[in-house]
Image: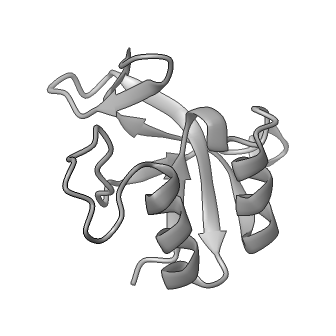
Amino acid sequence: MNPHLFVYGSLMSVAGHPMGDRLRAQARLLGAATIQGRLYRISWYPGAVEGGDPEARVHGEVYALSDPPRSLRWLDAYEGIAPGNPQPGDYERVERRARLEVPSAFLV
């Protein structure tokens, strides 16, 4: 199981959301990152959608999960995906390649 998780929106460290605090208690922040795609306003929350433009990027953060199965269970429930839930939600957890940003201290 992939222990790395890309997040955007309420789970980012700068958002100040309680679920982001829970994530940081169970994972190590690796840094700012991007994935290929676009953000859209779904309702009161954002949704990332993969697109055809390789230059379009969604900005977020990558975490290394300490216990991926445990963390992904509550994260899926938070996003509206739970075993036995008959209502399909807007959220889908998929693996995508994330690009970590290089800290400026490493640029020479």
Q: Position of residue 9 (x, y in %)?
A: 58, 32
Please tell me in which quadrant of the rendered image residue 38 appears. top left
Q: Quadrant of the N terminus?
A: bottom left
Q: Residue furthest left?
A: 52
Locate residue 89 relative to residue 40 in the image: left or right. Answer: left
For the point 33% across and 44% down, which residue is it? Answer: 91
Nearer to the camera, 47 or 82: 82
| Up/down of 96 relative to 102, above or below | below
| Up/down of 45 relative to 79, above or below | above
For the point 25% across and 28% down, which residue is it? Answer: 54
Q: Position of residue 23 (x, y in %)?
A: 70, 61
Give the color scheme: rainbow, by chain, secondary structure or one colour: one colour
Nearer to the camera, 20 or 95: 20
Is residue 81 at all visible to an observer of this figure? Answer: yes
Is residue 101 at all visible to an observer of this figure? Answer: no
For the point 71% across and 70% down, which residue is it? Answer: 27
Please tell me in which quadrant of the rendered image residue 13 appears. top right
